[in-house]
């Protein structure tokens, strides 16, 4: 792998949506992860589009902000739109072996904020953001070191605040779901039900428990990331000492390895 290949800097496990996903769900994924772009893939995981926060702002009759959830009436409006109706179709893509220089030139010429990285079959392999490109150029010595350090510090400080907000949101939702589950379990114990009703309620509880487990794991990953931030080590690869792109940290807050080291074993 060449040192300046995009696969060394891309987010290797990006959050994605399908064309049939509602604009509401897509926005909430952006809000939860603090990201501005979502690759859109088909059933075979082939890239068919890109959805940006700017696309949402252009299509919806209000201006969604990544700093706060939508109001109830805005949620209903966003629910009526499908991602496929407002995404950028047939977006620019690159292969994982392409150079960072080519990626930077492509993004500058097209004035785009990200590039889906695809394999030979056109399937999503990663996502390269403007920040990833800047960091790649910086680490290659094309930007002043002091400027890079200050920029990275600001980026990580902002990211830590983002993690803290997400942790509070996830904890609040988890607590709310657990109260609802407990209430439903009490009803199931205390009220007579036929077999069909009880079966339906059991399914609801089981699905809620599965969501709870995902939320608990996410909180644990967020806690781990915030602990590393408190120690001054957030974003440092524990194997090679290099920088872990923030895009990768958003998807996997608890990771301690950069993409290149993760591919050689570990997470």
Image (cartoon, helix red, strand yellow):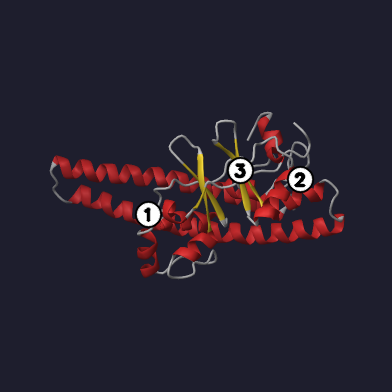
Label 3 secondary element: loop
The secondary structure type at the circle numbered 2 is helix
Which marked residue is nearer to the observer: mark 2 or mark 1? 2
Q: Residue 177 got which mark?
A: 1
Q: Nearer the viewer, mark 3 or mark 1?
A: 3
Q: Residue at x 63, y 46 (%)?
A: 248
- Comparing 142 with 92, the one in front is 92
Residue 171 in sight in this render: no
Measuring 55% from the left and 35% from the top, which residue is drawn there? 122
Q: Residue 93: which numbered mark, if any? A: 3
Residue placed under numbered mark 2 in the picture: 101
| Residue 111 vs residue 139, the one in the foreground | 111
Element class at badge 1: helix
Q: Left of 132 or right of it: where is 254?
A: left
- Report crowding for label 1: few under 14, some 14 to 19, many 20 or more residues within 10 A (C-alpha): some
Q: Classify residue 159 by image quadrant.
A: bottom right
Q: Is residue 9 above or below residue 69?
A: above
- How far apart are the alpha carbons under marks 2 and 3? 14 Å
């Amino acid at each position: 792998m060449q040192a300046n290949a995009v696969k060394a800097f891309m987010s290797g496990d990006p959050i994605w949506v399908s064309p049939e996903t509602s604009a509401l769900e897509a926005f909430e994924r952006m809000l939860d992860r603090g990201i501005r772009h979502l690759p859109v893939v088909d059933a075979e995981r082939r890239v068919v589009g890109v959805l940006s926060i700017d696309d949402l702002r252009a299509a919806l009759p209000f201006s969604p902000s990544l700093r706060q959830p939508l109001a109830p009436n805005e949620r209903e409006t966003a629910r009526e739109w499908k991602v496929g109706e407002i995404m950028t179709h047939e977006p620019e893509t690159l292969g994982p072996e392409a150079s960072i220089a080519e990626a930077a030139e492509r993004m500058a010429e097209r004035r785009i904020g990200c590039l889906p990285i695809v394999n030979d079959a056109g399937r999503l392999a990663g996502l390269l953001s403007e920040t990833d490109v800047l960091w790649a150029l910086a680490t290659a010595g094309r930007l002043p070191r002091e400027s890079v350090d200050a920029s990275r510090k600001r980026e990580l400080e902002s990211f830590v605040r983002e993690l803290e907000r997400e942790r509070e949101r996830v904890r609040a939702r988890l607590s709310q779901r657990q109260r609802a589950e407990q209430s439903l379990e009490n009803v199931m114990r205390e009220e007579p039900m036929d077999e069909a009703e009880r079966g339906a309620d059991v399914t609801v509880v089981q699905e809620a428990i599965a969501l709870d487990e995902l939320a608990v794991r996410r909180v644990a990953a967020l806690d781990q990331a915030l602990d590393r931030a408190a120690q001054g080590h957030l974003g440092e690869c524990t194997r090679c000492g290099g920088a872990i792109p923030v895009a990768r940290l958003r998807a996997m807050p608890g990771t301690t390895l950069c993409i290149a080291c993760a591919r050689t074993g570990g997470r």
